[in-house]
Amino acid sequence: MGREDRGVRMSLQTLRVLEAFLENPAEQLSGADVHQRCGIASGTLYPILLRLESAGWFVSRWESIDPSVAGRPRRRLYRLTSTGLKRASEVFASFNRGVLT
Amino acid sequence: MSERNVNPVRAAGGAGLQTGLAALAHWLIHHAACRAPPELSQRLEEEWRSDVAARSSALSRLRFAIGCCWATSVLLREHSCASVAIAGAAIGPKASIGYAGEEYGFPARRTITFFLVAGLHVVLFYGLMTGLAFKVIKEIPTPFQARILRPPPARALPPLPAPQLAKPRIEMAPPYFPPTEGPIDSGDIVAQPLPSTPSGGTETLPQAASRPVLRVPGGPGSGFPNTDDYYPSIAKRMEEQGVATVGVCVSPDGRLTSAPTIAQSSGSPRLDEGALQLAKAGSGHYRAATEDGRAVNSCYSFRVRFVLRPGR
């Protein structure tokens, strides 16, 4: 994809976001969903989502609903990419190694 | 009846507050999205509007909107630092987001905490400076302050008053004990043979009475200490002067054979004590009495005169 993921800094909040997505890697989550699972404030959450998306770890798309029919605005849904899944798994594996050994 | 009237008012007021907060949250989101990078502005506004709708309470929506404002500032900062343009969304416009490498939630919390702590310190110090310290200072009586605690500057030792040089006694010569042979009849120390001076054993011989014996009384000799060195300092301050007569018994080698005694007091116990100390210190420097030119054991007395002198 030509995106650079080496610049993603693994802060505690970033790890918590990734952890929320790794619970079910195929699941698509909106920012509100991630907030409910992680409790991260919006001021921190959206820069992280955009940062990971620009790094190629996430892809996002608009929810395919009709707002007039659903009675609410469409949501922006994020999903882990294969690269993101692999890199996030490596990150957590390295953390586990560091803890266990 | 009154409750039924009040509750709708409260409900209306609460609904008005909820509506106002919701409007404020939407305005903040719109404002934040407008400030975001142009390629992200439309997307972020729609995304944030949909996510804020998932919040239940008006306060939570307001907090979310404030967070969006902060997120915009973070994105702007990262956008200004970006060097690589990347795609922003799958169906949206391109986004250019850099990697500042910082999670701005932490600095925000740290900054707020820092200012809170700094403000508390300022309030505390202000209170101490204007309230507590002022009360403490008020409780200290001003005339009681430093005068008692200040050490007295001129009370250490009063200077000795100038001695009265007009007195005829002070004009006398200082004590001097010449190392010469013979009796001393002048000066501060004057030797006087005691009337019951025992002589040596040889003087009691009957043949000695047949011819006259040349007897020379003893006295302070060469190297005898100076009187001024044993003038008690307290006696000087009290301007005590006088003459003490000290009785001593001296061996042929000029040493005391017994402790000196005061034969006649000067009237001041301090001067008497000084005279005794002088007599003890002079042991070994006494000139023994002689009989026919031969040193013998002898007891005699001498006077020690303590006189104040100018400049001492």
Image: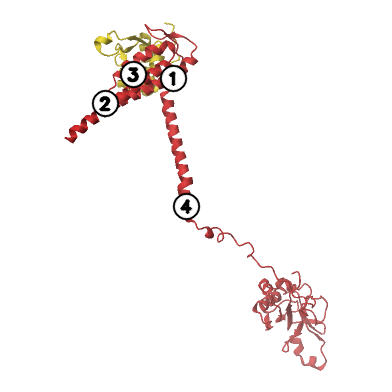
Q: Which mark is residue B48?
A: none
Q: Nearer the viewer, mark 4 or mark 2?
A: 2
- For the colour yellow, the matching chain is A
Of tags 1 and 3, which is closer to the observer?
A: 1
On the image, the x and y values in percent for residue B158 come to: 66, 68
Q: Is residue B295 left or right of residue A34?
A: right
- Disc number at residue A19? 3
According to the image, label 4 marks what residue?
B136
Marks 2 and 3, how far apart at CA: 38 Å
Q: Are marks 2 and 3 on the same chain?
A: no
- Quadrant of res B95: top left
- The disc, 1 or 4, on the residue closer to the chain's N-terminal end is 1
Q: Residues within 10 Å of mark 4 (few under 14, many from 20)?
A: few
Residue B201 in picture, x, y percent from top left:
74, 86
Label 4 to label 2: alpha-carbon separation = 53 Å
Residue depicted at x 46% and y 36%: B118
Disc number lying in front (1 or 2): 2
Amino acid at pointer 3:
Glu
Q: CA distance from mark 4 to mark 3?
A: 58 Å
**Chain under disc 1:** B
Q: Nearer the viewer, mark 2 or mark 3?
A: 2
Classify 10 Å Cα crowding around label 2: few (below 14), some (14-19), many (20 and above). few
| Colour basis | by chain
**Same-chain check, marks 4 and 3:** no
Callout 4 amino acid: Val
Q: Are marks 1 and 2 in contact (CB under 8 Å)?
A: no
Sequence-first tag of 1 and 2: 2
Query: Which residue position is annotated with label 1?
Result: B74
Residue A3 quadrant: top left
Q: Do the residues at discs 1 and 2 belong to one chain?
A: yes
